[in-house]
Image: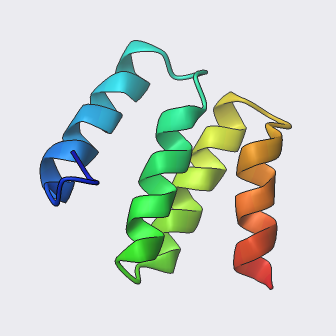
Amino acid sequence: MVRLGKGAVGVLVLEQAIELNPAYWPPYGHLSDYYKSMGDTATARKWLEKGLAQAPGTNALLRRIREMDN
């Protein structure tokens, strides 16, 4: 949905996915990518941190945080 220009709907779907399985890391990464693309780096980081709290050590989330720090 995000790629189709329907970001608000995409965010809802990703949040629903997190509710169904909080330990599944991809929705956190997609939410972070979406907010980063919108220029909201604080919210992007928040989603990465939430994802890492549920799925510690996930390389894809850690990589995104490192990229934001550079």
Display coloring? rainbow
Q: Is residue 64 left or right of residue 17?
A: right
Q: Is residue 59 left or right of residue 13?
A: right
Residue 46, by quadrant, is bottom right
Q: Is residue 12 left or right of residue 33?
A: left
Q: Quarter of the image for the N terminus: give it.
A: top left
Residue 57, by quadrant, is top right
The answer to whether 69 is drawn above or below residue 11 in the figure is below
In-front residue for pair 2/17: 2
The answer to whether 33 is drawn above or below residue 68 in the figure is above
Coordinates of residue 14 in the picture (x, y in percent): 33, 36
In-front residue for pair 14/56: 14
| Residue in view at x 80 percent, y 34 percent | 56
| Residue in view at x 58 percent, y 22 percent | 24
Q: Is residue 44 left or right of residue 8?
A: right
Find the residue positioned furthest to the top: 20
Coordinates of residue 59 in the picture (x, y in percent): 83, 43
| Residue in view at x 71 percent, y 49 percent | 61
Coordinates of residue 42 in the picture (x, y in percent): 50, 75
| Residue in view at x 55 percent, y 34 percent | 26
Coordinates of residue 44 in the picture (x, y in percent): 50, 65
